[in-house]
Amino acid sequence: MTPPSAYGAGHRLARHFFLDKDVVRMARALLGIYLVSEFEGRRTAGRIVETEAYRGPDDKASHAWGGRRTARTEVMYRIGGTAYVYLCYGIHHLFNVVTGPENMPHAVLIRALEPAEGIEHMLRRRGLPHLQYRLTAGPGTLSQAMGIRTEHSGIDLTAPQSPIWLEARQPPLPANQIVSSTRIGVGYAEECAKWPWRFYIKNNPWVSKK
C-alpha cells in the first residue's frame, strides 16, 4: 500500500492508495482515515473507527464469492477507489470502498465513524436531537448521517469533483491501537465467518455494538 503524499483536511486520497491487493491490510489502513461528503453545500466528515474486509471471490461472505457478477456487484470489479453502496434489508444503505486493481473484487465495509464536521447536518438526517453514539456507530446509520445512498454506488472517490471522498488528516495508527475480531452478521459464510477481518480502533466509543 502506498502511503498518502500529504496529510490534512483538503487532501483527497489518490488512486494509488487504494490499489493494494491485500484487502485485509486495506481494512486496517482505512482506520483513522476521514470519510467526507458534500451535498448541496453541506459538508459532513467523520473519522473511520471500524471496518470489515471482504475478499472476493474466495470469501463466502463477499457478494462476489465464486466470481459472482450481477448488476449490483459489477461495481466491485472496478478499480480501487470506487464506492460500492448496497441496500441491506431494504432499508440500510451500506458504504464500501472497493480496493485493489481492476477485476479483483475486494471491498472494505465502513462500519462506524467518529463525527468530525457538519454534525448539525448529520443530526438532522438521522432525526436525532443531540449528539449521541448511535448517530454514526453502525454502517447503516453512518451512511444516513453522511447522506450516502445506493445512487452513489460506482462513483470515483478519487475524482476532484466527487461528492464523497477520503482524506488522511493524521499519520497511520500504530498497530497496538487496532483490534481485530470476527465480522458481524456473516454466520451464513461457514468457515469464512471465523476469519478475524473486522477491525476497530481500541477503546473508541464510536465503534458499533456487536
Image: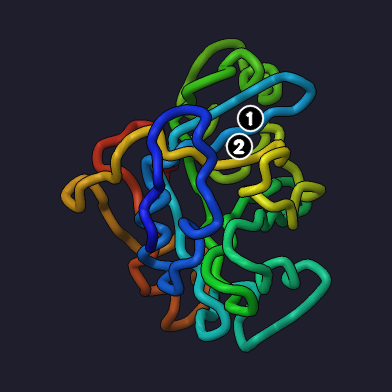
> In the orientation shown, which residue stands out farthest toward the left?
176
Seen from the viewer's position, the closer of residues 195 and 15 is 15
Q: Type of residue at label 2?
A: Thr
For label 2, the residue is 141
* Callout 1 secondary element: helix
For label 1, the crowd category at 10 Å Cα-Cα, with few meaning under 14, some 14 to 19 and many 20 or more, is: many
Q: Where is residue 12 in the image (x, y as percent from the top left)?
A: 54, 40
Dividing the picture into quadrants, the one containing residue 21 is: bottom left
Above or below, comparing residue 125 to residue 52 in the picture: above
Q: Type of residue at label 1?
A: Ala
Seen from the viewer's position, the closer of residues 201 and 8 is 8
Above or below, comparing residue 163 to residue 63 in the picture: above
Q: Position of residue 105 (x, y in %)?
A: 60, 75
For label 1, the residue is 145
Above or below, comparing residue 115 to residue 3 in the picture: above
Q: On the picture, is 81 further left or further right than 209? A: right
